[in-house]
Image (cartoon, rainbow, N blue to C red):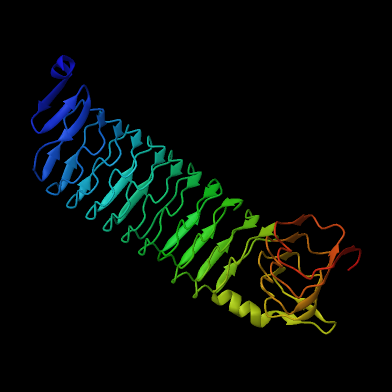
């Protein structure tokens, strides 16, 4: 108790311990945090509905979790250069916050930091930011543009989910991890991916109803599961020269796949061919299926649930068969694979109850 009397004090409308601001006690609309404060504690301003502007000191190093959560009228706050940490949910549900610049000294934006900041329109990142956490900008409807810094290596699950004002996304080569649903349900019209895609989650742009253009640069070696699932307006897709693997149903429900189905052709010698080298979807085929030597990849789930295919002849040109490519093909009884095939992923023949014969052949 004595220690509390010595080190804890009420300074104006602030309850302070050492250099930590523990709680704001006032009801003003404009708040100036005293110089010398290095940390704002968890939920220090949470639920203060009268505040519309906060001025932070240059001495500030850390903002605690939920520090300004539910400050429903907060519009303006500038983060000082030198700030090192912003806690989880620090500005969550600040529905009138208008702009935010993240200084270069902040390495990570924690989970839910700006979740449901519906009016946040101006958002800028500095070089030095490495990670954006899960749901960090979930439901920030007003954000129209973002430019990721080269230092960014990770974007968390649902980080920009339902950011309906967002128009363009470019994921740089240095961004190695992108969590599931990162941009799902957003207003993105054009998306560009430069990184490998190996550690990208499922449904990255799922349900982006305005997405019309998707560019996968040559550095992409894995096309993730359900990448643009249900993006009905997506018609322009630029593929890398030779992707190593294609996940399950990455373009399901797109105009691109509908057009591909019309263009895929049965050649005179009875082989199914596709000019882009990827066999995306064979769920409507039947009987004995021969793939042409133009094909190098069979996408994950390409023949999923097709009960009408009885035999599959895979040419030497195919080096990769994606996960679950023939899963549930109960009518499939015989498969011929090239002897030099490099990758057959998990569950490729799961549920193929009548598959009796799998042979490897040269010059198939």
The x, y position of residue 140, in whole percent, is: 33, 57
**Residue visible at 78% across and 59% down in the picture:** 319
Which x, y percent locates residue 40?
A: 24, 33
Q: How many marks do you count on the picture?
A: 0
**Can see residue 77?**
yes
Q: Where is residue 215 in the image (x, y as percent from the top left)?
A: 56, 63
| Residue 226 vertical placement versus 42 (above, below) | below
Q: In this view, does 330 lie above or below 141?
A: below
Q: Looking at the picture, how far across and down is residue 150, in whole percent?
A: 49, 44
Which of the image's four quarters has the N terminus?
top left
Horizontally, is 157 left or right of 83 in the view? Answer: right
Q: Which of 200 and 123 is in front in this view?
A: 200
The answer to whether 69 appears left or right of 190 in the picture is left
Q: Height in image: 150 above or below 221? A: above
Residue under the image location 68 percent in, 58 percent down: 245
Instruction: Say left or right for 16 vs 185.
Output: left
At x 38% / y 58%, what residue is drawn? 145
Observer able to see residue 218: no
The residue most toward the right is 362
């Amino acid at each position: 108790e004595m220690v509390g009397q010595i080190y804890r004090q009420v300074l104006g409308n602030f309850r302070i311990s050492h250099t930590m601001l523990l709680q704001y006690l006032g009801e003003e609309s404009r708040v100036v945090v005293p110089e010398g404060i290095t940390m704002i504690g968890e939920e220090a301003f949470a639920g203060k509905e009268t505040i519309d502007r906060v001025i932070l000191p240059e001495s500030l190093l850390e903002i605690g979790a939920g520090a300004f959560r539910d400050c429903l009228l907060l519009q303006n706050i500038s983060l000082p250069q030198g700030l090192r940490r912003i806690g989880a949910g620090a500005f969550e549900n600040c529905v009138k916050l208008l702009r935010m610049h993240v200084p270069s000294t902040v390495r990570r934006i924690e989970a839910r930091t700006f979740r449901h900041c519906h009016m946040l329109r101006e958002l800028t990142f500095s070089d030095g930011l490495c990670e954006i956490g899960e749901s960090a900008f979930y439901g920030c409807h007003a954000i129209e543009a973002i430019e990721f810094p080269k230092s960014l290596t990770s974007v968390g699950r649902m980080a920009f989910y339902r950011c309906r004002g967002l128009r363009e996304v470019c994921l740089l080569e240095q961004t190695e991890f992108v969590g599931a649903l990162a941009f799902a349900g957003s207003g993105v019209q054009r998306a560009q991916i430069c990184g490998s895609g190996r550690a990208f989650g499922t449904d990255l742009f799922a349900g982006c109803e305005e997405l019309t253009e998707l560019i996968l640069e040559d550095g992409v070696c894995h096309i993730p599961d359900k990448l643009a699932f249900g993006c009905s307006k997506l018609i322009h897709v630029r593929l890398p020269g030779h992707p190593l693997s294609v996940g399950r149903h990455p373009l399901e429900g797109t105009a691109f796949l509908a057009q591909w189905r019309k263009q895929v052709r049965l050649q005179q010698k009875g082989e199914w061919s596709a000019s882009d080298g990827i066999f995306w979807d064979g769920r409507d085929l039947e009987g004995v299926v021969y793939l042409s030597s133009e094909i190098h990849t069979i996408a994950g789930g390409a023949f999923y649930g097709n009960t009408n295919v009885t035999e599959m002849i895979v040419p030497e040109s195919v080096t990769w068969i994606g996960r679950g490519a023939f899963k549930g093909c109960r009518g499939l009884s015989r498969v011929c694979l090239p002897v030099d095939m490099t990758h057959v992923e998990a569950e490729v023949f799961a549920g193929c109850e009548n598959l009796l014969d799998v042979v490897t052949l040269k010059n198939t």
